[in-house]
Amino acid sequence: MYITDARHFLDEKGAIAARRGPAKAMADFHAMVIACASDFDGTGVMAPSCFKCKKSAVEATIAQDDAILWSCARCKAEGRISNWQGTLWDLSERPDLGS
């Protein structure tokens, strides 16, 4: 299981700190998982493909302790993301533009 604190990927402005390589790819994957899991309005944020097998979309849910849990049914990779609230990819409190 991959245990991730979302703040560890971010620079002082809240953007992804890594510019290239495996760290950037992992940070991008986690950002997509956060967006998918926090899209409570169901506006069509697609689940990202698993970073490990790249063949199946991951499932992401929010646990009772507010961590995001993600898993890949195909390769069985799974993870837990904490401290995602308030990041640029947290869609849970975006304004309702339909009103």
Image (cartoon, rainbow, N blue to C red):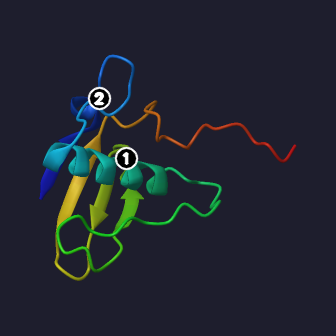
User: As drawn, which residue projects farthest toward the top?
Assistant: 12
Q: Quadrant of residue 11?
A: top left
User: As drawn, which residue projects farthest toward the right?
Assistant: 99
- In the figure, is residue 96 to the left or right of 59? right
- Residue type at mark 1 is Ala
**Image height of 57 relative to 42, above or below:** below
Q: Position of residue 61 (x, y in %)?
A: 40, 60
Q: Quadrant of residue 47?
A: bottom left
Disc 1: which residue: 31
Work out how far the residue at label 1 is from the one at label 2, CA to CA, in angstroms: 10 Å
- Residue type at mark 2 is Leu
Q: Position of residue 17 (x, y in %)?
A: 26, 30
Labelled pair 1, 2 in contact (Cβ < 8 Å): no
Circle nearer the N terminus (1, 2): 2
Callout 2 crowding tier (Cα within 10 Å): few <14, some 14–19, many ≥20: some
Q: Position of residue 26 (x, y in %)?
A: 22, 50
Query: In the image, what residue occupies the spot 30% across and 57% down?
Result: 69
Viewer-proximal residue among 55 and 79: 55
Query: In the image, what residue occupies the spot 46% across and 41% down?
Result: 89
User: As drawn, which residue projects farthest toward the front?
Assistant: 20
Callout 1 crowding tier (Cα within 10 Å): few <14, some 14–19, many ≥20: many
Question: Quick one: SS at disc 2?
Answer: loop
Query: In the image, what residue occupies the spot 12% across and 59% down?
Result: 1
Rendered image: mark on residue 93: none
Q: Quadrant of residue 54?
A: bottom left
User: How many marks overall?
Assistant: 2
Disc 2: which residue: 10
- In the figure, is residue 97 to the left or right of 49? right
- In the figure, is residue 40 to the left or right of 16? right
Q: Position of residue 66 (x, y in %)?
A: 38, 43
Question: Quick one: SS at disc 1?
Answer: helix
